[in-house]
Amino acid sequence: MLHQIDFLQHSNTNRFFLMAGPCAAESEEIVMHIAERIVNITNRLQIPYIFKASYRKANRSRLDLV
C-alpha cells in the first residue's frame, strides 16, 4: 500500500484517500463545480481527497492515432 507520495503523507494508514477529478478541464466553472461536489462528499465521509484534472485532452490519445 502506498503511504507517501513525494511530500504528501497520509497520516492514517488504515484508510485510503481519493484522487479524482475530470479527465479534461473544459472550463473553470465545470472544474470548480466538480471539485465542490466531491469535497462535499469526501468531507461528509471523512475521506482525504486530492483533486486531479488534466488541462489537455491529448494526454488520453494514442500517438499512432493522432
Image: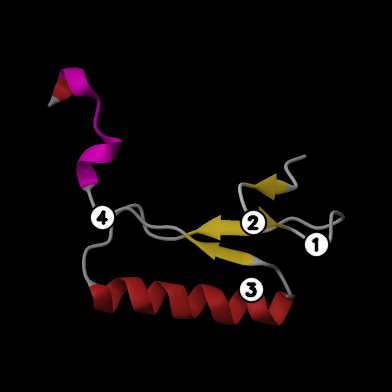
Which residue in the protein does label 3 denote? 42
User: What is the spatial separation of the Cα atoms under label 1 and label 4, in whole angstroms?
Assistant: 30 Å
Query: Which of the 4 image quarters holds residue 44?
Result: bottom right
Q: Residues within 10 Å of mark 3 (few under 14, many from 20)?
A: some
**At which x and y percent is residue 36?**
46, 80
Kindly identify the residue that appears in the image at 21 percent across and 70 percent down.
27
- Ranked by sequence position, the earlier of labels 2 and 4 is 2
Secondary structure mostly seen in magenta is helix
Query: Is 18 placed left or right of 57 in the picture?
Result: right
Q: Is residue 56 above or below residue 37?
A: above
Q: CA distance from mark 2 to mark 4?
A: 22 Å
Among numbered discs 2 and 3, the one appearing first in the sequence? 2
* Magenta stretch encompasses residue 29: no
Q: Which residue is mark 4?
A: 55
Which amino acid type is marked by label 4?
A: Tyr
Give the SS element for disc 3. Answer: helix
Give the Cα separation between the discs numbered 2 and 1. Answer: 10 Å
Q: Quadrant of residue 24?
A: bottom left
Badge 1 marks a residue whose secondary structure is loop
Which residues are the magenta region? 57-64
Residue at the farthest left position: 66
Q: Which residue is mark 1?
A: 11
Q: Position of residue 51 (x, y in %)?
A: 48, 64
Q: Is residue 43 above or below residue 48?
A: below
